[in-house]
Image (spheres, helix red, strand yellow):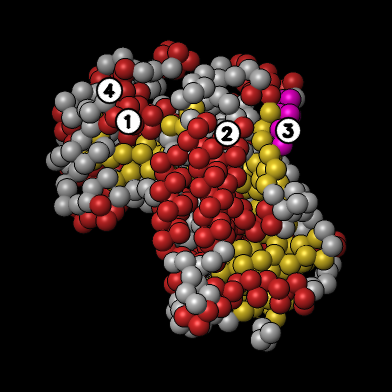
Amino acid sequence: MEQYQTLEHDVVVIGAGGAGLRAAIEASAAGCTVALVCKSLLGKAHTVMAEGGMAAAMANVDDRDSWKVHFADTMRGGQYLNNWRMAQLHAQEAPARVRELEAWGAVFDRTKDGRILQRNFGGHRYPRLAHVGDRTGLEMIRTLQDHGIHQGIDVFMEMTVVSLLKDGDRVVGALGYDRERGRFRVWKAKAVVLATGGVGKAFRITSNSWEYTGDGHALAYEAGADLLDMEFVQFHPTGMVWPPSVRGILVTEGVRGEGGVLRNKDGRRFMFDDIPDNYKNQTARDEEEGWRYVTGDKNANRPPELLTRDHVARCINREVKAGRGSPHGGVFLDIAWIKEKVANSEEHIKKKLPSMYHQFITLANIDITKVPMEVGPTTHYIMGGVRVDGDTQMSTVPGLFAAGEVAAGLHGANRLGGNSLSDLVVFGKRAGEYAAKWAKEKGAGTTNSAQVEEAMRLALAPFDRGDGGGGGENAFAVQSDLQGTMQDLVGIVRTENEMLRAIEEVGQLKSRAAKVGVSGHREYNPGWHTAIDLHNLLTVSEAIARAAVERKESRGAQFREDFPEKSAECAKFNLILRKGADGQMKVVREPVKPLPSDLQQIIDENK
């Protein structure tokens, strides 16, 4: 086999979004040498797409808010399948992480008396999202990068990691290649942190960019780690639906938080048609009352557009299927109507939602200050991921940590909007802190050259089936077929027969993927990159489908048309997916850990 470059660090962080950057900063601050490996360019992380804000109970706008209410909201949104320890730590530590970002240079929007401004968001009882207009994620990344570059972190951009390296049960490094030239590198490490984001590219319509191919999920799974809650995929209610070239691009929930309403083709505000019983006492029954809520009346009820994302997505799906949708298969999201309530409404919208205004005027030639947007559900986020310890963020494999979207537990069956950004910095910090501690205590392991060479051989195998090897399947065609299967059979509304079909089709696609051939050489070869991504996409797709079949109920982000109600039995377990000794994926039920009495009391008080 060819030579490969070897680099040695105490901690290797894979992924350079909010969680990866925060982990790298913390590990470096603890005195460790740190490598930050990212698939794209620094600054291109998907964190920048998180627009609405970061949830933290700072009580700057409504003094009734507290970490206890935030904890209760998060648990309720997750349908009580959350890792309660993660939900507790997140609610308690998020305000400090927001203030830390401010100290590092983040420029948040302000209240009239100079405090960090907070806005309403779906599922949150009080205005809780600290924000920077509608580009909060971008400001987070800018701040973390500006702070992080001074910490002595070694950054490796445009690198794809293809395998984790182990010494016995322990992870001791990673093998990857640079996407520009195709040359391999081995990063030796005492601890590895996964911060690779989600799996959106397994679906046809997604707000996620090309990097989101489930790399960290699959790397952890192949290394022997448990995956948790993979059935829970969040479909954001509002993505662009027109023109086709931008279908799926996110339209922030902040539009609804600032007063945007959803209407069908008849102009009817349909969200009043289906309000869950447990929300009726909090939800506006007329537009005037809902508008008072948005404009800051503490006693006004919540408008129905700010119900949880799974519920809003299903309501939109229902309108479209009933023939009441917009011309291009969505519904209308109208923020322009606030001209009836706000002087200089056009300037108000441009100030509050600058990115959305620019996005629609540039990509769709629509002025959102004057006319409604067309929106529809888009695959946005996966609650499922690597099973981690709530305090340390270490997976079930020693030396392997995970944080951010690739890690599971905090969000349970459904994530509340805004909890993702605070998740990144709360648990990114913890992952970096405990990875550094592990690295110092355990020292270096040994990497196995035979293991490295086998992983390289597998990565290069598609070239053997290319021009010189008798042809082969096309990687892009296999990926497209997989996305169609997941979109059509394991989407917003699910049935057992369709998901069993999906599992069968994923098996067939695995056989096709094993025959994928690529031509040319390794430099600038997108066909090769796609062939490598396929393994990860197929792994996470199978995990989602198998878990969704096993959970025979509708809960949180999963809606089963054949089991439309919640099941008391299913409320008692989480689903674990792990690789069996025979190489097959196994689904195991794990009892939900009971809440400590003090946390149960908090939930009871906040119901």
Count neighbours of disc 3 (C-alpha within 10 A) and say few if under 14, some if 14 to 19, many if 20 or more: few
Indicate which disc, 3 or 2, sits on the residue closer to the N terminus: 2
Q: Measure the C-alpha gap from mark 3 to mark 1.
A: 33 Å
Instruction: Please give the name of the residue rendered at 23% of the width and 28% of the height, measured from the top-left corner.
Output: 323
- In the rendered image, residue 435 lying in the magenta stretch gets the answer no
Q: Secondary structure at mark 1?
A: helix
Indicate which disc, 1 or 4, sits on the residue closer to the N terminus: 4
The residue stretch that appears in magenta? 588-595
Which residue, given by chain and number where applicable, does mark 4 sit on? Answer: 270
Instruction: Please give the name of the residue rendered at 20% of the width and 35% of the height, measured from the top-left corner.
Output: 326
Indicate which disc, 3 or 1, sits on the residue closer to the N terminus: 1
Q: Is residue 233 above or below residue 465?
A: above
Which residue, given by chain and number where applicable, does mark 2 sit on? Answer: 549
Which residue, given by chain and number where applicable, does mark 3 sit on? Answer: 590
Q: Measure the C-alpha gap from mark 1 to mark 4.
A: 9 Å
Indicate which disc, 2 or 1, sits on the residue closer to the N terminus: 1
Mark 2 belongs to which amino acid? Answer: Val
Which residue, given by chain and number where applicable, does mark 1 sit on? Answer: 316
Q: Measure the C-alpha gap from mark 2 to mark 1.
A: 24 Å
- In the rendered image, residue 589 lying in the magenta stretch gets the answer yes
